[in-house]
Amino acid sequence: MPQPKPAVYAVTEKGLALGRRLADHLGADLFAPARLAACGAAVPFDGLSALVAETFADRPAHVFVCACGIAVRAIAPHLRDKTRDPAVVCLDDTGRFAVSLLSGHLGGANDLARELAAVIGAVPVVTTATDAAGAPAIELLARDLGLAVDDFAATRRVNAALAGGGPVAVFDPLGQFCPADPEAARFFQWVAAPRPPEPDMPLVVVDWRLGPAAPDRLYLRPRVLVAGIGCRRGAPAADILGLVGHACREHGLARASIGLVASIEAKRHEPGLIEAAQALGAQLRFFTAEALATVAAPHPSATVEKHMGVGSVCEAAAILASAGGKLLVAKTRTGFSTVALCLAA
């Protein structure tokens, strides 16, 4: 399925040529008022606010060639949060400045502003505190390292400390937090226990286990847990997710650390299972009954063997997909589904 294109909006005759240049560079759709659209081979619109209401959530990035105030009023009703908002960049119609307006970090607006500025010879304007200070942003480091952020509100304290020059304490028992850039690494101080060396120092905990919540503590979750799942035909995603959440809470595991969901090949097209994996942000892997039968699962079932041709689905799939990792949660079930959780080897 083709990915949606970025959107470029030009609202003045002067900005139309610039918009065309930016759209061509990005492979984006160019939108312009109906009275100007034909001149720049653009998609016509009658009202910018109505157009943005249709496009905002569906496009990965929005570039406005207009005053920042116009752009702000157009996007304001549609803002959600930093994890879901797309990148928004605004350029004046003379091409002097490229302003990162929204979703600078996760959405990529800071990088997009710099890219577009380089293309047209403009000045990039980036105002996020970490960028202004030449410091890394914790959510970008986490994303690049494949670590899930438990609570984005907790990134504020960490980023404030980074913008101030650090340091930020890091407890990382699995060795998952390894910034590739030495300049980024110098802002952090690794510790041997989940507590900062100084009372006012924020702490980043990189772990798959639950821990106490605190305003100065940010949990990053490595994707090291495997959920083996079995389900009846038509099992709803809500039932599967509820069971997974219950199993994680009961055993002190972070749901966000589930990086892989595994099941039997016969469930490859089960809608509830697919939806549950998507909600977990996890990859899906399926095994044949023959492959699952090679695993000595601790709790086989004659009923499962009768219907699926193998004595265990959830435990066997979890063990197999984790490459023989440690079984942390044995088979747990509802009337619709079963789950087992392994720590990847």
Image: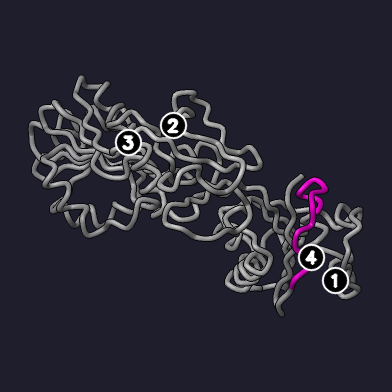
Query: Nearer the N terminus, badge 1 or badge 3?
Result: 3
Q: Residue at x 20, y 19 (%)?
A: 121
* Whole-number angstrom distance, CA of label 1 to CA of label 4: 16 Å
Q: Which residue is mark 3?
A: 164
Q: Are marks 1 and 2 in contact (CB under 8 Å)?
A: no
Q: Nearer the viewer, mark 4 or mark 2?
A: 2
Neighbour class for label 2 at 10 Å: few (<14), some, many (≥20)?
some
- Whether residue 27 appears in magenta in the rendering, the answer is no
Q: Which mark is residue 259?
A: none
| Color scheme of the displayed model | one colour
- Whether residue 323 appears in magenta in the rendering, the answer is yes
* Whole-number angstrom distance, CA of label 1 to CA of label 3: 58 Å
Label 3: which secondary element: loop
* Whole-number angstrom distance, CA of label 3 to CA of label 4: 46 Å
Q: Is residue 93 above or below residue 275?
A: above
Query: Nearer the N terminus, badge 4 or badge 2?
Result: 2
Label 1: which secondary element: helix
Q: Residue at x 76, y 48 (%)?
A: 322
Q: Which residue is mark 1?
A: 304
Query: Nearer the N terminus, badge 1 or badge 2?
Result: 2
Residue nearer the viewer, 240 or 340: 340
The x and y percentages for residue 110 are 31, 34
Q: Quadrant of residue 310?
A: bottom right
Q: Which residue is mark 4?
A: 330
Q: Which residue is mark 2?
A: 187
Neighbour class for label 1 at 10 Å: few (<14), some, many (≥20)?
some
Query: Nearer the N terminus, badge 1 or badge 4?
Result: 1
Q: How many labels, in total?
A: 4
* Whole-number angstrom distance, CA of label 1 to CA of label 2: 52 Å
